[in-house]
Image (cartoon, rainbow, N blue to C red):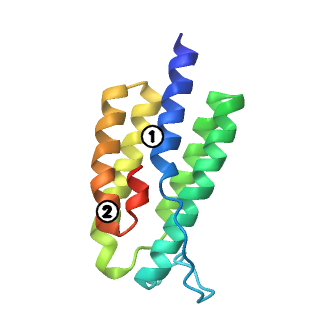
Amino acid sequence: MHKRYSAIALCAAAVALAGCGGSGNSGSGTTGLGAHSPSTVVFRADLATLCRTGNAAIKAAAASNPAKALTVLGKYLTKFKNLTASLPLQSAYASFLGNLTAEAGALRAGNAAGLKSATQKNAALAKQLGVPACAG
């Protein structure tokens, strides 16, 4: 039963990340990764891409092994933390990252209420960031 619950929780986390897949490309050839603040358009495109690839990787891992999905989730949290928000969105993105970390912790602990709470908070923050599909 615990493994089944973990798989369900992993799927919920994957769904939370799933919505980040938006379309749009800045066409600048640059990314928001690194020490310099990118443009808002570049940041939003990078965030959408990261959410889309993270969701696919977590779903694939969860289908075969819930423990592996947690490892993949950890790797993607690092990638989210390495993404540099544009200056006007840094505060909202910091809150978004805090909630992603809370979602991962709740998932590891099997805390469904904590997972739901962090996911709901991120829905509002995703809209603030201009990536409303991340609220999904």
Characterize the local packing of mark 2: few (<14), some (14-19) or many (20 or more) Cα atoms within 10 angstroms. some
Q: Is residue 42 above or below residue 108?
A: below
* Residue at mark 1 to residue at mark 2: CA–CA distance: 20 Å
In the rendered structure, find residue 104 and report the number of the disc placed on it: 1
Residue drawn at x 53%, y 60% is 21
Most distant residue in the top direction:
1
Contact check, label 1 and label 2, Cβ < 8 Å: no
- Tag 2: amino acid: Lys
Residue drawn at x 41%, y 74% is 85
Residue drawn at x 40%, y 49% is 100
Which of 77/125 is in front?
A: 125
**Percent x, y of residue 101:** 40, 47
**Percent x, y of residue 92:** 29, 65
**Foreground: disc 1 or disc 2:** 2
Most distant residue in the bottom direction:
28
- Tag 1: amino acid: Ala
Q: Is residue 32 above or below residue 27?
A: above
Q: Which corner quadrant of the image does residue 23 belong to?
A: bottom right
Q: Which residue is mark 2?
A: 127
Task: Judge left or right: residue 69 versus residue 127.
Answer: right
**Percent x, y of residue 78:** 53, 56
Residue drawn at x 60%, y 87% is 27
Q: Is residue 20 above or below residue 102?
A: below
**Percent x, y of residue 114:** 31, 32
Which element carries disc 2, helix, strand or loop?
helix
Most distant residue in the right direction:
64
Characterize the local packing of mark 1: few (<14), some (14-19) or many (20 or more) Cα atoms within 10 angstroms. many
